[in-house]
Image (cartoon, rainbow, N blue to C red):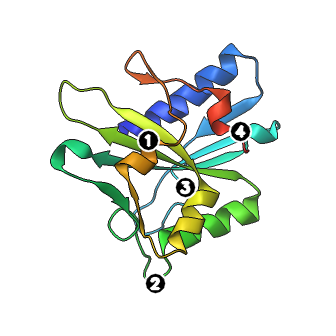
Amino acid sequence: MTEFERGLVTSFNSYFQENSVRGISYRLKQHRFTSQFLDVLVDSLNPDYYLGIECKSISVEKGTKALYFTQHFTTDKKGVHQITRISDFLKQSGRCGFLAVELRYGVGHSREAYAIPWEDIRERFHSDSLKYTIEEIRSYPSIIRSGGGYRVEPEVWVKK
């Protein structure tokens, strides 16, 4: 589990506890020869918090200019792209999906994170543009950093 994934799981669980919301966020254990569906799962009777979140981190300080569907996502042994697998899982489970993108700027610089609705990812994947530029990523709702971690803000995760 990456630090970003752990931070999101912790922030959701803290939010649920502090606001008396019945819900839990977790990450399924990843096994060596099986692919996981998503990085973070959130379960709640409140449909706004029945989520599946894929996490990607981009090292902007190393000159990365965009999130590329070919470079930052995988294809399995059967040739099925990760975006297709995740889209199928979200549809079958009824979860609302998001791509959480963390932009890293190197030592001594704050990180930024943004939540992109999965429907936007799926539509972009099936278009002629197979990437999201850093500027496009920044146009989505920000996942607020607090005390070195992240803080859940309900309006970021509510399906619009």
Can you tell which of label 3 and label 1 is closer to the viewer? 1
Give coordinates of residue 93: x percent, y percent: 74, 59
- Cα distance between the residues tagged 2 and 3: 18 Å
Q: Which residue is mark 2?
A: 79
Can you tell which of label 3 and label 4 is closer to the viewer? 4
CB-based contact (under 8 Å), mark 3 and mark 4: no
The residue lying at 52 percent from left, 60 percent from top is 36
Res. 69 image quadrant: bottom left
Give coordinates of residue 11: x percent, y percent: 54, 26
Give coordinates of residue 82: x percent, y percent: 49, 69
Q: Which residue is mark 1?
A: 138
Q: In what element is the residue under mark 3?
A: loop
- Quarter the C terminus occupies: top right
The residue lying at 48 percent from left, 66 percent from top is 35
Res. 24 image quadrant: top right
Residue 1 shows up from this direction:
no
The residue lying at 63 percent from left, 22 percent from top is 15
- Indicate which disc residue 67 carries: none
State the residue in front, 136 or 154. 136
N-term mark: 3 or 1 = 3
N-term mark: 2 or 1 = 2
Q: Which residue is mark 3?
A: 38
- Indicate which disc residue 158 carries: 4
